[in-house]
Image (cartoon, rainbow, N blue to C red):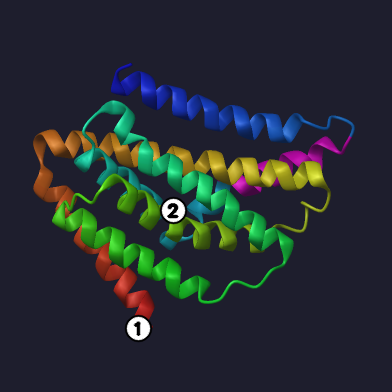
Amino acid sequence: MNRTACLRLALGTSLTVAAGAALAHPGHDAATVSASLWAGLAHPFTGADHLLAMAAVGVWSALIARSAADTLRLPLAFVALMLVGAAIGLSGVALPAVEPMIAASLLVIGLLLALRAKLPAWAGTLLVGGFAIFHGYAHGAELPATAGALPAVLAYVGGFAAATMALHLLGIGAGTLLRRHAGWLARAAGAGVALYGASLLVA
C-alpha cells in the first residue's frame, strides 16, 4: 500500500468514527448531537497549542518515516492515547499539570522536528502518546454544555478525533513536500513551535 492510500485510509477511518458516533443513537435529539459533533471538529482548531502540536507530529512523522505505514505510526498513537486522556477528562478525574505538559509537548516535539531527530520506534511512540494523553484530557474536560447525553458525548469525541487525524494528515502532507524540496523550512517551523512552547511554559 503506497503512502497516498495509507493517508486516505486513515482519514476515511477517522471520518467514519465521527459519523458513526453521531448517528449511533438516532432516537436522540439530532440537533444536539450535530452541535456536539461540530464542537468536537472545531475544538482542535480553536487553540494554537493543540493545532501546532498535532500538525508538528505529522510533519515530524513524515520527515523520519522509513515507509508509508511508518508515517502513520505516531499519528495513530497520538489519537489512541488522546482518547484515553479524553476518557480521563470526561470521568472528572483530576490530572495534574495539564497545561504545562501541553506546552512541554510543543517544546519537545518542536525540537525533535527542528533537529530531525530519529528516536527508536518505541521511544517516539511513548513520547508522543504520553503528551497526547494531556491533549485529550483538555478536550474531554472542556466538553460543551450541549453534550450532556451519551450520543452527544460520543459525537463530540468522534469530532475532535477526526479533526486531530486531519491535522496529522495535513502535517504529513506538508512534511512530505518539505522533505523533498525544503527540509530546512520544516526545521525552521519546528524551531518556531519549540519557541512557542517555551513561551507558554514561562508565561
Give the magenta range.
28-41
Residue 34 x, y percent position in the rendering: 73, 39
Q: Which secondary structure, mark 1?
A: helix
Q: Nearer the viewer, mark 1 or mark 2?
A: 2
Mark earlier in primary sequence (1, 2) = 2
Residue 79 x, y percent position in the rendering: 49, 45
Q: Quadrant of residue 170?
A: top left
- Where does label 1 land, which residue? 202
Horizontal arrangement in the rendering, residue 136 relative to residue 183 (left or right): right
Residue 185 lies in magenta, yes or no? Answer: no
Quarter of the picture holding the N terminus: top left
Residue 43 x, y percent position in the rendering: 56, 53
Q: CA distance from mark 1 to mark 2?
A: 24 Å
Horizontal arrangement in the rendering, residue 87 relative to residue 188 (left or right): right
Q: Which secondary structure, mark 2?
A: helix
28 versus 55 height, above or below = above
Residue 35 lies in magenta, yes or no? Answer: yes
50 versus 102 height, above or below = above
Please tell me the numbered disc located at residue 129: 2
19 versus 195 height, above or below = above
Q: Given the image, on which type of amino acid does mark 2 rest?
A: Gly
x 23%, y 51%: residue: 119
Horizontal arrangement in the rendering, residue 162 relative to residue 90 (left or right): left
Residue sitting farthest toward the right: 27
96 versus 156 height, above or below = below
x 44%, y 44%: residue: 77
Residue sitting farthest toward the bottom: 202
Q: Given the image, on which type of amino acid does mark 1 rest?
A: Val
Residue 50, visible in the rendered structure: no
